[in-house]
Image: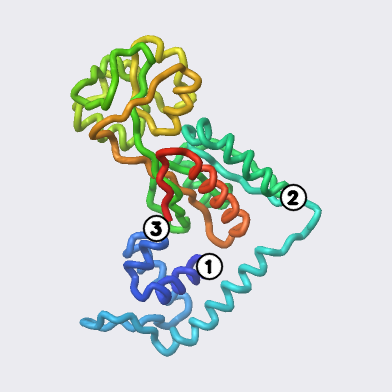
Amino acid sequence: MNIYDIESFLRIVQKGNFSKAAESLSLTQPALSQRIRLLEDELGYSLFMRQKGCRALQLTPAGEEFLGIARKMTGLWSEALNIRPDSGAPAILSVSVADSIMTCAMPSISRSFLRANPEIKLLLNNYHTRDAYRRVEEGELDAAVVGKRFPSTNIYRKAVYTEPWVFICGKDAPYSGVIHPSMLDTRRQLMLCNKEVDDWQEFWFSSSLNSIAGLAKISYMDPDLFEKDLWAVLPLTVAQLLERTAHGQILQIQDGPQPRAVDIIYRKGEKSEIIEKFIACVRREAEKIPGIHLLN
């Protein structure tokens, strides 16, 4: 039994059914059901009544008793996490940030966070998204700012904002107005390797093999490239950075890729108060960017 099992049980009670609880925990319903079955096996009794044709979720008498104990356990766990063995030592928040977010949005976020929370030491890393999920799950990282989603059993996900994909090219390139994919020559394309772009590329152009370059990270992009009649479809914040540093121009693209969702993932209960401060800071900074859509 661990704190995630207890929190899963309480979430089911709160939401009233397994499907809503699983969605709020970013789990599949079978994964959540398996977690509860293992908890029941360990306790030696059933927590929920399982009757065919009964839609209402009901606790067993033992489940009712366990509910009070579970609430006490989460309270004690929260108290334990707030213990500071050395009040003079700064709290540390270790965060991995996706490359494109690290390059474009993170400088202002980190400055704002550290100004508002001078007692906290912020350690930033840049791991591949799947690796970041693993490190958060295993406790090596406190949180990660990611632009992709992967299934996970012990991670909570806070959807922070979405941003559109836009068209960017050199100021002297022969493009203006609203761009449609049918107007584009992929032989002049700089392609950022990303699931949303891959799907869009496959739909409109059948392949990405014709693009002049495929970039795994935005930091690999040379600002001088846009002086060579090249173009790219990029997340808004990435394009805004290149507009400033590469003398590019941003144009709206019709029928572009699906907006990119930016999430913060973390293990609930571990440094929860600090992580909430970090999430609030990311939201404040994102709100300042025109075109960004904050999520509740």
Numbered disc 3: secondary structure: loop
Give above or below for 226 relative to 269.
Answer: above
Determine which quarter of the picture holds residue 53.
bottom left
Front-lying residue, 273 or 283: 283
Provide residue 295's location: percent of width, then percent of height.
42, 52
In the rendering, which numbered label is found on residue 248? none
Kindly report the distance in space between the C-alpha atoms of the residues bearing marks 2 and 3.
31 Å
Which corner quadrant holds the C terminus? Answer: bottom left
- Residue at image position (38%, 15%) is 170
Q: Name the side, left or right, on which 219 lies relative to 254.
A: right
Mark 3 / mark 1, whichever is N-terminal: 1
In the rendering, which numbered label is found on residue 26? 3
From the image, state whether disc 2 or disc 1 is nearer to you.
2
- Residue at image position (35%, 69%) is 33
In the rendering, which numbered label is found on residue 2? 1
Numbered disc 1: secondary structure: loop
At label 2, the amino acid type is Pro
- Residue at image position (70%, 51%) is 91
Kindly report the distance in space between the C-alpha atoms of the residues bearing marks 3 and 1.
18 Å
Label 3 Cα crowd, 10 Å radius (few <14 / some 14-19 / many 20+): many
From the image, state whether disc 3 or disc 1 is nearer to you.
3
Task: In the displayed orientation, state which residue is furthest to the front.
Answer: 177
Label 2 Cα crowd, 10 Å radius (few <14 / some 14-19 / many 20+): few
Kindly report the distance in space between the C-alpha atoms of the residues bearing marks 2 and 1.
28 Å
In the rendering, which numbered label is found on residue 90? 2
Mark 2 / mark 1, whichever is N-terminal: 1
Provide residue 107's location: percent of width, then percent of height.
58, 34
